[in-house]
């Protein structure tokens, strides 16, 4: 297969019998995004009620801080930042996988009913079992995984097609969203309001435990997602072409969906169902890199950047009122997407 | 012999086409009959059991002293009319959206209309401090239209024109910005949250004749324009180049379809709340019946959507007497299993 439409998009890296096609622009974009993530991370650690200078922050991170800066950074700010970064990366990567799988810009863990199911599970736990974060997060994971399994099962009929998966996903999703509305209607108004706070997505009170959940998802599943890159490229050609090229279509699709759901599950358990990051991050990353294929890594970096910047604004940019991070990320990501769409000249 | 071979398929095709048209027309008549039944049910059945004779009396000799008469006149009839109008408008708007976006996931609310209306409502309650139905309705309608205009504006600014993918992405982006703002307001303010919650569920429980009257001109004009759009949309469905060659102005048809969609969906959303299911699913089901011809697809979507909304509303009124389940909820519980069954049963699915 030769790429005919763009002249020399990358360089080939060879070593013995291994070779790798390096897309130059993606590498540049990836490095830039990584730099921005580091910068935003340092700023979030530095600013707050107890301001710390950036050099002091770096010194503290390297283990040479004072007792005060150690406490503020390691106990208060770092867990929250790590949660935001890990969850953002997981959402971004998950979105990239699902958009590639469904060949649809509206593809996201929503498509397989995950986010709506997670919300239903969380709401049920919140309103019926208990309001602590552990219950809510457990409810979310159970609800999300259960609905993903149901959607896949219903769409399976001597194999699935992306198209049928998407449609069944939509039907189940609508059912779950109505259940959520029903639960919220039945609940006491104040309970419903605080449940909504969680549903929008929030980073308040997240300790290392939450960072570990999202972090584990990223560390375990992101490498697998990267290994699936080639499969995704083939699947994007359509089932028939992929089969002709020797790809086990059904198994690959199941693998991609499982990894995508796993990433979303880790992120949802730690910050709540912030669906928008999964939708927007891959689109934004893809428009920057102009590369083909799922682009999992740039999407993950973009997701981490989006969520950490949003949290920075949510914490410090809005005066006394702290908004949940989900509110800020949807305004910020949406505005950025609008700007990109009105600027770029062609769709894609 | 050769002449025979050439003419035979054509002469066989003609009666086939006629019988297909006959079948579709019969189907439409049946659907209208179904709609009529739904209307009758919606007037006669409710959370409060009222005898048939009393309902008929209320319609013929209205007596304001009788409670049951008031229920029929002031609640059931406006409710039925609102349901009818909102359902029909959402079905029609949904069919147009799918034509515009060429995407089976495209719900009319996707283009920023639902969140636009929500923002209007929230601003009316939280900032302007009014809960009067008529002013809320105008706030919501203007804000919904503005949101949709913003979406189209973003799409038109790029050189690619009204490319479906860009349309969906722009709708998504605007929706998320607006929903962020709505949530930022709603999560801080208890009073506004309550208004928002009862609207967002999608309910016909408190119909307001003034609101319906205010939206009627938009609904009527939108429906009339949609009828004119059926043929040009058929041509455009052949592909942009073919459409252009056949003399259809792509930009004009798309633009007009967009405006009609905003009028219909905006009015319906303002009246009944963001009921997602109808506009998304009914046009899709209608397409399974009619095939791609918009001259059939549009009326089928309209009638079936109105029927579905009314039936779902009646079910919601009856299942948990004396309280009610909002129509947005019953809708999904009635419609989703049907949709899933149809998707599973059909081997091949209609693509857009």
Image (cartoon, helix red, strand yellow):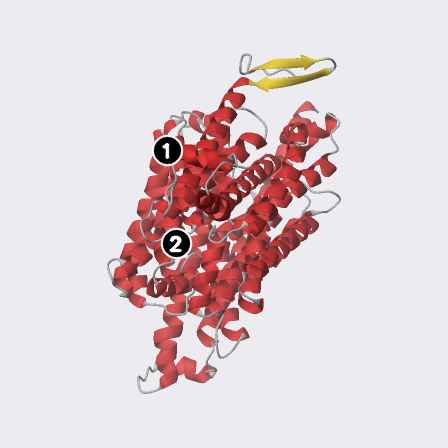
The residue identified by callout 2 is B183
| Chain letter behind tag 2 | B
Q: Check disc 2: other Cα within 10 Å, few if <14, some if 14-19, many if 20+.
A: many
Mark 2 and mark 1 in contact (Cβ < 8 Å)?
no
The x, y position of residue A337, in whole percent, is 41, 36
Circle 1 or circle 2, nearest the eye? 2
| Chain letter behind tag 1 | A
Q: Is residue A27 visible?
A: yes
Kindly indicate the quadrant of the structure image that contains residue B5.
Answer: top right
Mark linked to residue B116 = none
- Above or below B62: residue B76: above
The x, y position of residue B177, in whole percent, is 38, 45
Secondary structure beneath disc 1? helix
How far is the residue under mark 1 from the one under mark 2? Answer: 22 Å
The residue identified by callout 1 is A339
Q: Is residue A167 visible?
A: no
Q: Residue at x 44, y 50 (%)?
A: B92
The x, y position of residue A283, in whole percent, is 49, 34
Relative side of B325 to A16, left or right: left
- Above or below B88: residue B178: above
């Amino acid at each position: 297969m030769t790429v005919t439409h763009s002249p020399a998009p990358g360089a080939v890296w060879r070593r013995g019998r291994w070779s790798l096609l390096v897309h130059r622009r993606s590498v540049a974009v990836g490095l830039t995004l990584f730099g921005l993530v580091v910068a935003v991370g340092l700023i979030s650690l530095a600013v707050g009620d107890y301001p710390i200078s950036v050099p002091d922050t770096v010194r503290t991170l390297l283990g040479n801080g004072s007792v005060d800066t150690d406490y503020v950074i390691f106990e208060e700010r770092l867990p929250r930042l790590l949660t935001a970064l890990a969850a953002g990366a997981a959402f971004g990567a998950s979105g990239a996988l699902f958009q590639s799988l469904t060949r649809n810009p509206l593809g996201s863990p929503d498509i397989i009913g995950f986010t709506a199911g997670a919300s239903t599970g969380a709401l049920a736990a919140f309103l019926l079992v208990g309001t602590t974060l552990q219950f809510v997060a457990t409810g979310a994971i159970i609800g999300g995984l259960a609905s993903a399994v149901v959607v896949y099962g219903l769409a399976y009929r001597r194999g699935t097609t992306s198209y049928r998966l998407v449609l069944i996903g939509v039907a189940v999703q609508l059912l779950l969203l109505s259940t959520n509305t029903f639960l919220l209607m039945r609940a006491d108004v104040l309970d419903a309001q605080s449940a909504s706070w969680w549903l929008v997505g929030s980073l308040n009170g997240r300790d290392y435990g939450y960072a570990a959940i999202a972090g584990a998802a990223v560390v375990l599943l992101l490498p697998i997602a990267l290994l699936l890159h080639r499969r995704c490229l083939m699947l994007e050609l359509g089932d028939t072409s992929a089969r002709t090229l020797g790809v086990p279509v059904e198994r690959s699709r199941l693998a991609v969906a499982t990894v995508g759901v796993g990433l979303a599950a880790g992120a949802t358990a730690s910050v709540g169902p912030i669906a928008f990051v999964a939708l927007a991050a891959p689109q934004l990353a893809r428009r920057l890199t102009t590369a083909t294929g799922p682009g999992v890594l740039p999407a993950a970096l973009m997701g981490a950047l989006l969520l950490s910047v949003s949290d920075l604004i949510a914490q410090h940019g809005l005066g006394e009122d702290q908004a949940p991070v989900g509110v800020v990320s949807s305004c910020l990501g949406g505005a950025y997407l609008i700007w990109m769409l009105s600027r770029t000249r062609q769709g894609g | 012999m050769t002449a025979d071979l050439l003419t035979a398929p054509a002469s066989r095709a003609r009666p086939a086409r006629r019988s297909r048209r006959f079948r579709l027309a019969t189907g439409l008549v049946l659907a209208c009959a179904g709609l009529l039944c739904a209307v009758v049910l919606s007037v006669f059945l409710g959370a409060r059991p009222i005898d048939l004779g009393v309902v008929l009396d209320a319609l013929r000799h209205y007596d304001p002293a009788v409670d049951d008469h008031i229920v029929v006149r002031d609640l059931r009839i406006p409710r039925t009319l609102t349901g009818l109008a909102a359902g029909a408008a959402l079905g029609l708007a949904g069919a147009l959206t799918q034509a515009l976006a060429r995407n089976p996931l495209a719900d009319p609310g996707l283009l920023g209309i639902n969140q636009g209306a929500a923002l209007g409502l929230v601003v009316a309650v939280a900032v302007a401090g009014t809960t009067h139905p008529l002013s809320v309705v105008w706030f919501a309608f203007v804000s919904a239209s503005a949101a949709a205009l913003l979406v189209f504006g973003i799409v038109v600014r790029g050189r690619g024109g009204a490319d479906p993918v860009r349309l969906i992405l722009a709708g998504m982006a605007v929706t998320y910005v607006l929903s962020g703002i709505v949530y930022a307001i709603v999560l801080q303010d208890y009073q506004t949250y309550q208004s928002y919650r009862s609207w967002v569920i999608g309910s016909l429980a408190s119909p307001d004749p003034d609101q319906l009257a205010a939206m009627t001109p938009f609904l009527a004009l939108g429906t009339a324009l949609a009828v004119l759009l059926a043929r040009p949309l058929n041509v455009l469905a052949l592909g942009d180049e073919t459409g252009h060659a056949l003399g259809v102005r792509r930009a004009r048809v798309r633009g007009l379809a967009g405006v009609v969609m905003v009028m219909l969906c905006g009015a319906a959303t303002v009246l009944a709340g963001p009921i997602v299911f109808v506009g998304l699913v009914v046009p899709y089901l209608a397409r399974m019946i009619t095939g791609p011809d918009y001259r059939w697809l549009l009326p089928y979507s309209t009638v079936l959507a109105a029927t579905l909304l009314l039936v779902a509303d009646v079910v919601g009124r009856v299942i948990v007497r004396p309280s009610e389940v909002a129509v947005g909820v019953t809708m999904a519980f009635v419609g989703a299993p049907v949709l899933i069954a149809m998707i599973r049963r059909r081997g091949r699915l209609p693509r857009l």
